[in-house]
């Protein structure tokens, strides 16, 4: 059976992969992120590649082993919004996003070990627009107090309580959760990489 490794500790990515029938192991890369790019698509591609390569360099892999690395960022008005450092930053981020449309970018890297110990590598980025209804500061502070936004890019999870304020999305919902599953399977198939079994 093909060995598939998810190079991410994200419970949301684990759930998305499990939901589509992928059997995998979790092994976060835990490498120090080094950003050399400025365009959101290129930043997430760079970070997803770093995560996958960190895992690839840790172990002697069997032929056919597949490593999945992913990274998600939120961008609004040209500004990159990562995970909040504290509650006040989360409040400020959500005050900025409420009533507006922002972009969620996820970069994905798929690496497959070949017979000659080389890696076949595929990297891409997906973008989804997310629009929020107007939200009061009181509602935002109540949400932040739950602790839910503290480990999420853009300070919210669309699949959590803040989903109540989403006016609409244009693009892939699973991309906003953290892994564009449909695009992942399409790209893998196009490049001859099997993700099931």
Image (tube, rainbow, N blue to C red):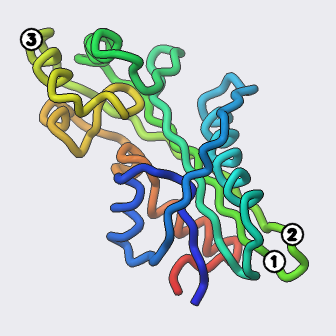
The one nearer the camera, 185 or 12, is 12
Residue at (45%, 29%) from the top-left corner? 74
The residue carrying mark 1 is: 114
Q: Are marks 2 and 1 in contact (CB under 8 Å)?
A: yes
Please give the residue where the numbered disc 2 appears in the rendered image. 118
Residue 82 in the image: state x and y as whole percent: 47, 25
**Residue at (77, 57) in percent of width and height:** 57
Q: How far apart in space, not on screen, are marks 3 and 1 (Cα)?
A: 54 Å
Looking at the image, residue 193 lies above or below residue 1: above
Residue lying at 76% horizontally and 82% vertically, measured from the top left: 63
Residue at the far front: name it: 59
Instruction: Using the numbered discs, state the Cα–Cα distance from disc 3 to disc 2 in whole angstroms.
Output: 54 Å
Residue 20 in the image: above or below residue 75: below
Other-residue count near label 2 (Cα within 10 Å), few / some / many at <14 / 14–19 / ≥20: few
Report x, y in % for residue 47. Answer: 64, 40
How crowded is the residue under tag 3: few (<14 C-alpha within 10 Å), some, or many (20+)?
Answer: few
Whether residues under marks 3 and 2 lie with C-beta atoms below 8 angstroms apart, the answer is no
**Could you say which is closer to the camera, residue 120 or residue 173?**
120
Residue at 49% x, 39% y: name it: 72
Quadrant where the N terminus is found in the figure: bottom right
Residue nearest the observer in this picture, 28 or 136: 28
Residue at disc 2, secondary structure: loop
Residue furthest out toward the right: 116
Marks 3 and 1, the one that precedes in the sequence: 1
Graded by Cα atoms within 10 Å as few (under 14), some (14 to 19) or many (20 or more), the crowding at tag 1 reads some
Calculate the distance from the C-alpha at mark 2 to the C-alpha at mark 1: 5 Å
- Which of marks 2 and 3 precedes in the sequence? 2
Mark 3 residue element: helix
Numbered tag placed on residue 138 in the rendering: 3
Percent across and percent down for residue 4 are 57, 73
């Amino acid at each position: 059976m093909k060995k598939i490794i998810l190079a991410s500790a994200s419970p949301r990515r684990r759930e998305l992969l499990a939901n589509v029938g992928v059997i995998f192991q979790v092994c976060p890369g835990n490498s120090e992120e080094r950003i050399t790019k400025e365009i959101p698509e290129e930043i997430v591609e760079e970070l997803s590649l770093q995560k996958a390569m960190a895992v690839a360099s840790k172990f002697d892999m069997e032929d056919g082993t597949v490593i999945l690395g992913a990274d998600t960022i939120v961008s609004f008005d040209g500004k990159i919004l990562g995970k909040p450092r504290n509650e006040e930053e989360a409040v400020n981020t959500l005050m900025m996003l409420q009533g507006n449309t922002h972009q969620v970018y996820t970069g994905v890297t798929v690496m497959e070990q070949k017979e000659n110990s080389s890696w076949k590598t595929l990297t891409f980025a997906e973008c989804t627009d997310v629009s929020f209804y107007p939200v009061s500061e009181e509602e935002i502070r109540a949400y932040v107090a739950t602790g839910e936004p503290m480990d999420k890019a853009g300070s919210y999870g669309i699949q959590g309580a803040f989903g109540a304020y989403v006016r609409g999305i244009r693009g892939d919902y699973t991309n906003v959760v953290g892994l564009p599953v449909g695009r992942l399977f399409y790209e893998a198939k196009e490049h001859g990489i099997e993700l099931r079994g």
